[in-house]
Amino acid sequence: MIAIGVLTVVLAVQGPGMAPDGWQVELAAALGHWAAVIQQFLAFIPGWISTLTVFSALGALVWTALRSRKHAATPTASGNRPDQAHTRTQTEKSQ
């Protein structure tokens, strides 16, 4: 992490990291343009609605993650958890 930070500072001090022409510049300009167009298109939506939308999406992701974790922790039909099945099989073989 320290090396990444040092590299970032060195590159920032040396000057621009991109060439003045080429596909990277064209792509960055196109992305900037489309971001501005989308922002203007959605400007009529009040901030509280967009906030509710973002937090609802975040809540849905958290709920899905917790639900999938709960399903992964349930025992299988044989009574073994999937992550412990290999350990139990080796223990039974050694006896």
Image (cartoon, grey):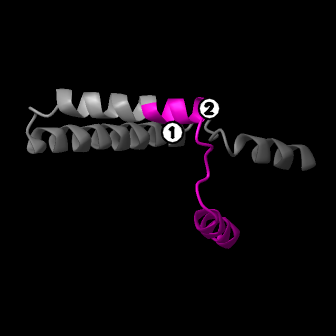
Spatial CA distance of label 2 from label 1 is 53 Å
Q: Which mark is residue 39?
A: none
Task: Tell me: 29 left or right of 36.
Answer: right
- The three-letter amino acid code for the residue at tag 1 is Thr
Q: Secondary structure at mark 1?
A: loop
Q: Which residue is mark 1?
A: 74
Element under disc 2: loop
Give, as a three-letter code, the residue at label 2: Gly
Q: List the residue tagged with mark 2.
A: 22
Furthest-front residue in this view: 20
Residue 76 visible? The answer is no
Q: Which quadrant does the N terminus fall into?
A: bottom right
**Which quadrant holds residue 42?**
top left
Q: Is residue 32 left or right of residue 41?
A: right
Percent coordinates x, y for residue 9 in the rendering: 60, 69
Sequence order check: which comes first, mark 2 or mark 1?
2
Residue nearer the viewer, 71 or 4: 4
Position above or below: 9 against 51:
below
Q: Residue shown at 65%/68% (left/top)?
A: 10
The quadrant in which residue 75 appears is: top right
Residue 37 colored magenta? no
**Few, some or many C-alpha atoms within 10 Å of disc 2 (few <14, some 14-19, many ≥20)?**
few
Residue 91, percent across and down?
83, 49
